[in-house]
Structures are given as structure tokens and as C-alpha cells.
Image (cartoon, rainbow, N blue to C red):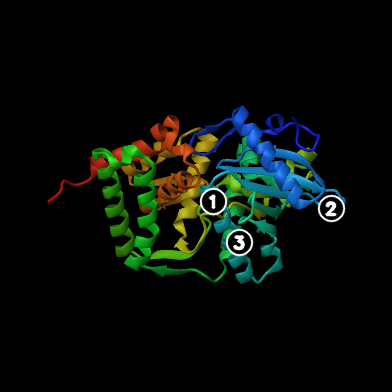
Amino acid sequence: MSVGGRVPVYELMGVREVAGGLLLVPPGSAGRAADELRLRLAARELGRGRWEAVAQGFSDVLVARRRPADGGPPVLVKCPRTGEAVRALVRERDAIAVLAAQVRRPELRELLPRTLDSRLGGRPPVLVQEVLPGVPGDVLLSRRPELAAALTASAFDALADLRGATSGSSRDGRLVDGWLGHRLAVLSDRVRWCRGAEGTAGLLALRARLRRELTEHPTEVAWTHGDFTPGNLLLRSPVPNESPDESPNGQPSAPASGGQPIVTGLVDWADALADGPVVVDRASFALALGWLLEGRSWGEQVVHALRTGGLRRPETGELPLSGVLLAWLWHVSANLEKSRRFARNRRWLREVLVPVLRELAGSAPPPR
């Protein structure tokens, strides 16, 4: 069975590795049938058009590109499979709307995917966004790893421009408790190991260390993306001969001047905060680079940072241990909250989550 008489969903599905080492595979026959039904119902709501590509996504969201029958530009259709995915898309939609309203420069607003239609309360729930141009940063780095430093500089500049004048510093314990409390609770709630003796000790040590560091020293606070990695970055490629299919809208990406990648979009704002710790985004980018360029899992890198007192990469410079731990906490809690599959993935738990909490539990001072 095919969708709209075209290519079957399971033939369009992609399989790829994500930061942290979780390998997602296309769903089984029951999942494929459910996804075909979702797309058929979504097509009925959205009107005539054709599906051009379908990708499973990294969470419980079915993501598809659809071209309207009137010949207009393609759109990105997101169909959540679970209640967690619906809530994540609501957060993303609302965060983009608030940030876009605060950004004064039109060229910066163009970096944010506009919501064209939101039916997240419908059956089926659907979110329609514009398709931004550009090559995903992780794809670009897989082909041109030597661009890592230039890509990182472009990424940090774009994010700083979007934040504008919203940044300040804080040592407010209530703000810190807001950053930590819910995310630590997600780990304890979703992962059984975290409720055992060693896992609980690691969570308590993490909370104590971060709260002490963030309340004793000023922390820069501003708009925080929350999942700022090369995979959520779109760029105009500096390579003049990129093939047309490397841009999500099916058009070739114009070469950037001087060989410098130019950011054309920032996507996946589900974990964004208007008053988040800025260091989270820098540290997330650094950890993602370690995975993409060297194959080192987030868990391995954070354990190394715990043993050496920080993280240093040539592209990002020195990062404080508190920032690395915050980025790791943001990463694992967001994945667990978006999809319960992470809690069942032994490889992800073994490589990304457990080593860090085990290291923290072992280095925690004995109770008085």
C-alpha cells in the first residue's frame, strides 16, 4: 500500500545515527501501517498535494515533506505519534512564535521556521511549517570535517544575533531550581536504574554540584535553544557543486562567499527557554561535535570532563564543567521526555546516561 498512490512509507523512511549513539530503525509493519494512516488523514485535512519524502525523525514524530497541488513551495508536515510528541511540538511552536515576535531584524526572523498551520489539538494532530533552505550541519560536517571551526563560529554568531539584547546574569536559586528540578525528575521517573541506589546517588550529586556552582557564580541567562547541535542547523554550503537534493526544498544551495558557511535556519526549538543558561547551547554544540567528528559518545565526553574539570575543543574553546553537565542533563532529559523509547534502549543508557551518573555517584563526598 502506498500513500496517495506514490512511494510506500517504509521505502521513504530514513535510518541514521543521532548524537549520543542511538540508532533508530523504521517501525515494523504495524508502525508502517499506522504511519500511512496518519499521512492519509493529514492529507485529507491539508488538501490536495503529494508527499515528496518521509523521515521517521529522532523522536516520536513522523516528519514528511509535502508539495501542494497548486505548485506552491513544499511544506514540512509533522505528525506526532504520542502525547509526549504532541507536547513537544506545542512547545516548539510557541517558543518560535514568542522569539520571532522579539526579533526585530527581518533577516534573523527568516532563520526560524514559520508555522503555516497548527492542528495539534485535532485528529490527527498536525503541525505544518515552512521548509527552510540549506544543508544540515551534520551532513556538511560528514563530508567536510575541516569546516568544523568555521561552521561553529557561524553557528554561535547566528545564535548570539537571535538572542540580541535579552541576556543578563543571574545567581537566583529559584531560577536554577527551575532548570534542574523537572529535568532530574524526568530521569528518575523514566529510567528504573535511576531509582536504584547508584542512580539516586548520582542524581543527588549532580543536583548538589550544579546548584552550588550556579548559585555561587553568576550565570549568563538569555534565550536558550536547548538542543543546539549541528543537526539542528541549516547552512548555505561553501561548496559550489553541492547536488540539488542536499537542500530540503529540493533546490541547490548557493555557495557561500569566501568558503564560510552561512546559517540559513535553526530548527527544533522544543527545548527552548527564554531565560535559560546560555552555556547549555555552547556545551551541547561541543559535545555533538565530539560525537560527529570523533565518534565519542556524550557519556564518554562528560565522564572525561568530570575527571579533568572541564571540556576543551579547538572549535569552541574551554567550557566549564557546570556547562557540560547542564548540556548533558538537557540532552538526556529532553530525549527521555520526547520518547519513551530512549528508556528502553540499552545501548543509549549504557553509553550516554549510566556512565555519567555512576561517575558522579563515585565522586560524591560521603554524607555527613
**Marks 3/2: CA–CA distance:** 23 Å
Position of residue 88 in the picture relative to residue 38 (left or right): left
| Relative image position of residue 191 (x, y in whole percent) | 37, 40
* Location of residue 171 by image quarter: bottom left
Measured as percent of width and height from the top left, residue 1 is found at 74, 29
> In the image, residue 26 lies at what x, y percent?
61, 31
Evaluate if marks 1 and 3 touch, with contact meaning CB atoms under 8 Å apart: no
- For mark 1, give the secondary structure: loop
Q: Can residue 303 be seen in this view?
A: yes
**SS type, badge 3:** helix
Tell me the CA gap for discs 1 and 3: 14 Å
- Residue picked out by circle 3: 96
Residue bearing the label numbered 2: 72
Check disc 3: other Cα within 10 Å, few if <14, some if 14-19, many if 20+: many
Q: Which of marks 2 and 1 is nearer the N terminus?
A: 2
**Who's the residue at 36% across and 43% down the image?**
305
Q: Which amino acid does label 3 sit on?
A: Ile
Q: Is residue 221 above or below residue 154?
A: below
Rounded to the nearest angstrom, the CA distance separating label 2 from label 1 is: 30 Å
Q: Disc 2 residue type?
A: Gly
Closer to the camera in the image, 75 or 19: 75
Q: Which badge, 1 or 3, is on the more N-terminal residue?
A: 3
Q: For the point 70% across and 42% down, which residue is it?
A: 39
162 left or right, relative to 360: right
- Is 20 above or below relative to 235? above
Label 2 packing within 10 angstroms: few (<14), some (14-19), many (20+):
few
Residue located beneath label 1 in the image? 228
Which is nearer the N-term, disc 3 or disc 2?
2
Name the residue type under label 1.
Answer: Phe
Task: Give the residue furthest to the left.
Answer: 368
